[in-house]
């Protein structure tokens, strides 16, 4: 069971906050890795899109990151100001900031969508997608 904390960021007069999981405090029995595209890979994709006259739309990947579902449930203690009882525990169904497996879950989710809904084929040598 991991702990949750509020992270605050001041932007001018506005204060933004987000809920984060303190997964770094737990022992790392399993390492999670997520592939990141190189500049060359992005250039190739843009060149292919240009050749195929495909529509390229920019997007906010940070928001997409939080839509990934976790393969196995993670449990977290809520922050002190959110607890209704001392033994309350939350079950995390989706990716959260600070969760080690969040990046891997996001990559797996994106690969699944690209294969099942967009018609892409996954490379057999893709080590980071399970």
Image (spheres, grey):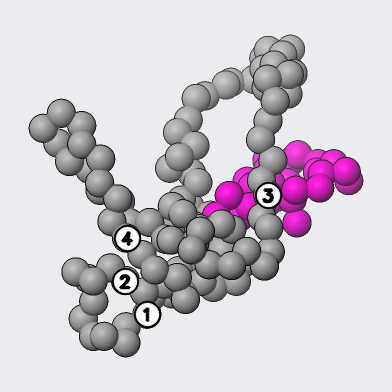
- In-image side of 37 versus 81 (left or right): right
Could you say whether the residue bearing mark 2 is in a helix, strand or loop? Answer: loop
Range covered by the magenta-colored residues: 102-130
Q: Earlier in the sequence, mark 4 or mark 3?
A: 4
Quarter of the image containing the C terminus?
bottom right
Q: Which mark is residue 33?
A: 3
| Mark 4–mark 2 CB contact (< 8 Å) | no
- The answer to whether the residue labelled 3 contacts the one labelled 2, judged by CB atoms less than 8 Å apart, is no
Q: Residues within 10 Å of mark 3 (few under 14, many from 20)?
A: some
The residue at the point 30 percent across, 50 percent down is 7
The residue beneath circle 4 is 5
| Secondary structure state at the residue bearing disc 4 | strand
Q: Earlier in the sequence, mark 1 or mark 3?
A: 3
Q: Which quadrant of the structure image shows residue 86? A: bottom left
Residue 102 shows in the view: yes
Q: Which residue is mark 2?
A: 78
User: Which of disc 2 and disc 1 is earlier in sequence?
Assistant: 2
Among the two numbered marks 4 and 2 on one chain, the one whose residue lies closer to the N terminus: 4
Of the image marks 3 and 2, the number of the one nearer the N terminus? 3
Which structural element holds mark 1? loop
Please tell me whether mark 3 sits on a helix, a strand or a loop: loop
Query: Residue at label 1?
Result: 89
């Amino acid at each position: 069971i991991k702990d949750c904390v509020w992270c605050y960021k001041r932007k001018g007069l506005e204060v933004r906050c987000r809920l984060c999981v303190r997964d770094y405090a737990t022992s790392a029995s399993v390492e999670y890795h997520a592939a990141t595209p190189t500049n060359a890979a992005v250039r190739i994709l843009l060149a292919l899109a240009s050749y195929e006259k495909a529509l390229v739309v920019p997007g906010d990947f940070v928001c997409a990151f939080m839509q990934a579902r976790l393969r196995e449930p993670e449990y977290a203690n809520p922050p002190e100001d959110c607890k209704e009882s001392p033994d309350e525990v939350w079950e995390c169904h989706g990716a959260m900031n600070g969760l080690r497996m969040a990046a891997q879950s996001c990559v797996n989710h994106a690969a699944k969508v690209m294969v099942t809904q967009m018609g892409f084929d996954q490379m057999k040598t893709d080590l980071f997608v399970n």
